[in-house]
Amino acid sequence: MLRARMQAGLTQEAVAQRMGTSKSAVSRLEAAGRHAPSLSTLKRYAQAVGCELEVRLIPIDRSRS
């Protein structure tokens, strides 16, 4: 998330404004592993930084177990 924001040349404040939320909320989103945001929040973040959100299910290779 941080990389996408940096590539877009945006500050947390700018992303927060585009999402209609606070800078602290954006900071929490970017803090890996500390928050479990909803898909709608992730989609809003992606849109704010000029990205699309892609969620994929990838089969586990059971032969490695």
Image: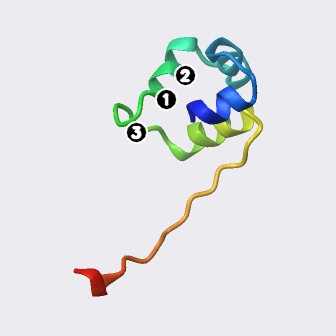
Q: CA distance from mark 3 to mark 2?
A: 13 Å
The residue beneath circle 2 is 26
How far across and down, in percent of the image, does residue 29 sit? 49, 29
- Mark 1 element type: helix
Look at label 2 and name its amino acid: Val
The residue beneath circle 1 is 29
Residue for point 57% across, 30% down: 2
User: From the viewer's perspective, is 35 left or right of 30?
Assistant: left
For the residue pair 48 and 32, the one nearer the viewer reads as 32
Q: CA distance from mark 1 to mark 3?
A: 8 Å
Residue 25 against residue 1 in the figure, above or below: above
Residue for point 42% across, 27% down: 31
**Quarter of the view holding residue 64:** bottom left
User: From the viewer's perspective, is 32 left or right of 4?
Assistant: left
How far across and down, in percent of the image, does residue 54 sit? 63, 56
The residue beneath circle 3 is 36
Residue for point 68% across, 21% down: 15
